[in-house]
Amino acid sequence: MTGNVIGHARSASFRTLDLVGLDTAYNVARNLYNTLPNDEKRESFKVPEFMEKMVERKLLGDKTGGGFYKKAGKEILTLDLATFEYRPQQKAKFASIDAAKQLDKLEDRIAHLSTATDKAGEFLRRTMTQTAIYAANRIPEIADNLVEIDNAMKWGFNHELGIFETWDAIGLEKSVELMKQDGLAIPANVQKMLASGAKSFYKSENGVRHYFDFASNGYKPVSLPAGLTVLKSLKDQNKVIKKNAGASLIDLGEGVACVEFHSKMNALGDDQLGMIQFAVKEVEKNFAGLVIGNQGDNFSAGANIMMILMGAQEGEWDEISMAVRKFQNTTMSLRYSPKPVVVAPHHLTLGGGCEMVLHADRGRGIRRDIHGPCRGRSRVDPGRRRNQGDGRPRI
């Protein structure tokens, strides 16, 4: 319930505690309880009895060989809190979680789960709404604005969305109604915000992302590091040269164009290959160079194997042969492009995605999430592959 399905780290809650170390989490919680006598959620920092026992027994997580989980050969066992013995895991089944996993977009999954009526839905609604209320009440006590809190959650815990971004995914007005139904007090900051007519914590205007500033009771642009390019903002500013269902060609400015993939896991198929072929010709005529990159979860999981499998099952061998030749011709067009090509890989860069890097002038890691730190860089960096004396412009 607290892992990938809601955009949190795969380690979710208790596996994360094992990684951090229960003694560390224990001391942090005790310190907060002792130093926050007037905090409205002080009692939630009280260490549970079972955690006290785990610390006493040195079940501290990875550092001691076992915590909430323990590896036994190839099997991962889980701690039974009734007996404090390890046993095989028992998979839980929740209809709302199963349904949410069918939704590709994280915001849609969160919106679905926030109104689900089974145990998982009730648990997530209560934890998400109470966390949101607590965070709103901490401004300006611990942070000047909500962007700082969101960034702390994303950078510190590897969450895909911050607390207020999650709140927007549920819907501000809708979530406030859910809070009232649960008898929760709405933060004064949020009540004032609603009274101003604002309906979300974030919004986009002319391609620029804005956040609601509680201090001024109005929207302000989200500040970004100098030199950082946000592809979504460029698209909102009508900088798209050409697009199809799986890829776009975007004008980055300063004479550089960018091919962005936006298919599921950025798998490569006709849409992406066709866009690259068009981009190489367009850049040759009108630009100084080409970048192939995106700000999705992964650079590319490689070729769309499902399409190849379906073709094989239908015996469409000529079509498969043509697809292979098209891919080879596309990667070679990067290799022999008269203008320099930079590929910016991150996270999954498999098969055909890796070949894009290998055939380019340069392969450079980029930020996966423009609101977070640089989370991953490709190990593939072929460097300058062409003759240095060819007289071509460089990026």
Image: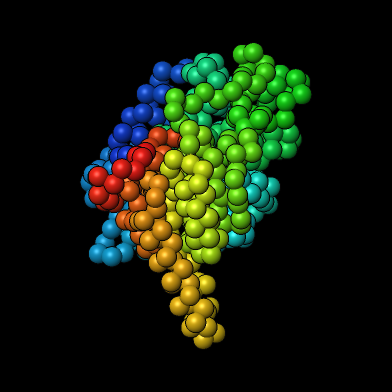
Q: Is residue 92 left or right of residue 366?
A: right
Image point (48%, 72%), residue name: 323
Residue farthest along the left direction in this orientation: 64
Q: How many marks?
A: 0
Q: Is residue 91 left or right of residue 99?
A: left
Quadrant into which the C terminus falls: top left
Residue farthest along the top direction in this orientation: 216
Image point (65%, 46%), residue name: 111
In this rendering, the answer to whether 311 lies above or below 220 is below
Judging depth in this view, the residue of 185 and 357 nearest the camera is 357
Tell me where residue 7 appears, x and y as whole percent. 51, 46
Toward which corner of the image does residue 335 lie, by quadrant?
A: bottom left
Q: Is residue 387 left or right of residue 3?
A: left
Judging depth in this view, the residue of 85 and 295 nearest the camera is 295
Judging depth in this view, the residue of 134 and 225 nearest the camera is 225
Toward which corner of the image does residue 130 lie, by quadrant?
A: top right
Tell me where residue 386 appears, x and y as whole percent. 27, 50
Image point (47%, 52%), residue name: 280
Judging depth in this view, the residue of 215 and 378 nearest the camera is 378
* Residue 95 in view, yes or no: yes
* Residue 92 in view, yes or no: no
Image point (44%, 35%), residue name: 372
